Image: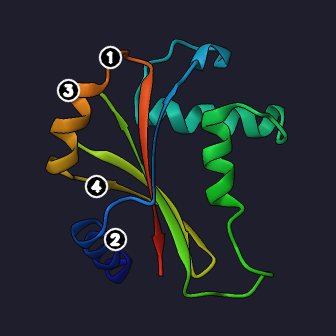
Amino acid sequence: MNNLVNIIKNIMAKREPNKIESIECNFEDLSEEYQYNYTDLIKYWKHIEKKDKNSKDEIYQEYKKIKDFGFNEQKSNVGIFSLFYFKDNERFLSLGKFKDEFFHLDIKCPEYQKVLSDVIEKENEVFILTYWII
């Protein structure tokens, strides 16, 4: 896992994201009280996965794209990870798949944190920065 963290840090330091997008989340489907944070984002993904694996929900599709990532059931040196960011958080949630291993990490990235916090206008808005691991 330590090697994976170093790979991700290196990619973030040297490359721009392959894709950046903003999605407005709606966690109202959760039966309990919710907040727009990483814990409830993961709960939401699990809830939608249990309820409807074919859901077209945008934020669920981001999760599914990473979880289902792979090449013909073989281990590959190609991977993908996305950084998810809610306004004014100190950390990003990183979700990815590399060598057929699904992972999530808590990552600090002050360079992006300040910029994204300034542009995010709504509490339910999440920015997603996606990178390839090659």
Q: Residues within 10 Å of mark 1 (few under 14, many from 20)?
A: few
Snapshot quadrant of residue 49: top right
Snapshot quadrant of residue 1: bottom left
Which residue type carries mark 3?
Asp
Kindly indicate whether the residue at mark 4 contacts the one at mark 3 (C-beta within 8 angstroms).
no
How far is disc 3 from disc 2 in space, using C-alphas? Answer: 24 Å
Which residue type carries mark 1?
Glu
Residue bearing the label numbered 4? 107
How far is disc 2 from disc 4 in space, using C-alphas? Answer: 10 Å
How far is disc 1 from disc 4 in space, using C-alphas? Answer: 22 Å
Residue bearing the label numbered 3? 118
Kindly indicate whether the residue at mark 4 contacts the one at mark 2 (C-beta within 8 angstroms).
yes
Task: Please tell me the numbered disc located at residue 97.
Answer: none
Q: Residues within 10 Å of mark 3 (few under 14, many from 20)?
A: few
Residue bearing the label numbered 1? 121
x and y percent of residue 95 in the render?
A: 48, 56
Q: Nearer the viewer, mark 3 or mark 2?
A: 3
Residue bearing the label numbered 2? 8
Secondary structure beneath dot 3 equals: helix
In terms of depth relative to the viewer, which is nearer, 95 or 32? 95
Residue 7 visible, this angle: yes
